[in-house]
Amino acid sequence: MRSHATHCLLFYICERSGLVSDLERNDIEIMLDDVGMVYDGADGREVQALTSVTMDIHKGEFISLLGPSGCGKTTLLRIIADLLQPTSGKVLVGGETPKNARLKRRYGMVFQSAVLYDWRTVVKNIELPLEITHQSKKERHERALKMLDLVGLSDFADHYPRQLSGGMQQRVGIARALALQPEILLMDEPFSALDEFTREKLHIDLLKIWRKTNKTIIFVTHNIQESVFLSDRVCVLSPHPGRLSAVIDIDLPRPRTMDIRDTPEFTAFVSKVRNSFEGV
Amino acid sequence: MKKIKRILTSKIFVTLIWIVALIVVWELFAFHVEQTKRTPENIQPHLSGIVDSLTSSRKINGSQTALQMVMENAKATLSRAGIGYIIGIAAGSVLALFMSLSGVIEKLAFPYLMLIQLIPILGMAPIINAITGDIAKSRIIIAAILTFYPVAANTLAGFKSVQKEKHELMYSYAANKFQLYTKTMIPACIPYFFTGLKISAPMAITASILVDTLQGGIGLGCLLSQSLKGAMTRYVFWDIVFFSAVIGILSFYLMGVLETILCPYKRIGKKE
């Protein structure tokens, strides 16, 4: 009897610490199985936004969804985020439906604009998700300051968003997305509104943050260089109808620095990705 | 040169120019009227005459000076305008909240909202008076109705202006409806709400005065019409005109000041 109880206790501890579930999940964070999305167009015809996307995304992987506008990359991200329901196929996030994953707050969202709250200071912006999950005031503040430190904006805690540059605002957006310690970071063209210099700096910073936090990152972009520089794998999506036309492994060494952009290997990957587009 | 330009475009300087220009134009007309009419104070008296009438200690109705009379009636009118204003704000913002919460309520209420704006409310004063059976109450109700529309319409516009991404952000946090409103929607619509307050504050005051003129009793409008009918010196009329203009402008600015106090982020953003 006693040994059974001990066993149960051990199992319980393992499960609480995530050991068992990790083994069960077998390293796959997100599973997309024949996912399709059909919209009703304005003229009454059906629009095929996304057809038959099947792929696995691993834990801790940096994945880019790359493609021109209308290829369904944002649609795919929104399906994973539970903002859209696919009209066919199945999505599993850690073995669960996207809805359950969202309710368990496993997603951090970063948008094209920073979507900060004007009326809150930087630190209060990062505390927002922690307020929603009813964390204590002290806990909230400590966590928010830690997140600010992670994105290198500790000196700006008490500034208001409109006092910050676009790049700094987007960093606050990333810090806010990390505040609830989600496993998955969903980023929808987060740097496309920034200038080239700021963007390159944020690329380096994002990779540092990724290495420190071990998040799974799904990064939507229409910039080929950006996707090659950041990702482990680039998912190339082509339009009319939106479909996954290639998945390309980027075997560039890590940690990656700015110089890697000048290497022939980088250029080779860029042209490989470019050549894999269909019907653009 | 730069410094001179900065002074010339500064707010205080512009305001000063406006005031001086108004005084000059007023006095030019007053001179003209003085030369051509027998009773210039009926058309346009000199500003000095108006100031004199306010400062003189002559009793005009046996017991009160002009200033005391204006103040006593202003108290009645402004308190009614104030009560009506607050009722209108409460009703308008609560309706906007319900319209934002429920599409059905929005569809049902919107035509009535438009209707209220289209009906000449002041013309309905006698009817409202008949319904309430009380002069003071009917004036409060009219001030409230006039306040109601700008507050409701602007607050609703504020709720609708919240970025789609903010909704999605709250959705991704699995926030409930109460949190969505307290953390995102209501704070986001505060500037719009204040726009409504700024529009309706002078309106509530003007409406109270106008409704006064239609009915008897105590109030700035009553005093105004008595003065116009010759029951007392015509200068009382001019005193009231200027007094209510100043109060109307002050009420607008008061709302602006209130907004800057309540929204510190606006204050800081402007300086940078």
Image: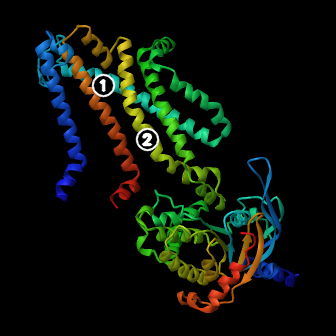
B212 above or below A177? above
Q: Seen in the image, is A8 located left or right of residue A200?
A: right
Residue under circle 2?
B195
Q: Nearer the viewer, residue B87 or A30?
A: A30
* The quarter of the displayed image where residue B84 is located: top left
Task: Using a 10 Å C-alpha cutoff, classify the residue at mark 1 as few (fewer than 14 neighbours), some (14 to 19) or many (20 or more).
Answer: some
User: What is the x, y in percent for residue B88?
Assistant: 47, 31
A109 above or below A27? above
Quadrant position of the N terminus of chain A in the picture:
bottom right
Q: Residue furthest front?
A: A279
Task: Using a 10 Å C-alpha cutoff, classify the residue at mark 2 as few (fewer than 14 neighbours), some (14 to 19) or many (20 or more).
Answer: some
A33 above or below B176? below
A201 above or below B237? below
Viewer can see residue A150:
no
At 15% from the left and 21% from the top, the residue drawn is B30
Amino acid type at image mark 1: Lys
At 58% from the left and 82% from the top, the residue drawn is A207
Q: Tell us which disc is closer to us: 2 or 1.
A: 2
Label 2 vs 1, first from the N-terminus? 1
User: What is the x, y in percent for residue A156?
Assistant: 42, 70
User: What is the x, y in percent for residue B10?
Assistant: 23, 50
User: What is the x, y in percent for residue A259?
Assistant: 54, 90
* The quarter of the displayed image where residue B52 is located: top left
Chain label for disc 2 = B
At 55% from the left and 45% from the top, the residue drawn is B159
Residue B75 - label: 1
Residue A160 - label: none
Q: Nearer the viewer, residue B160 or A158?
A: B160
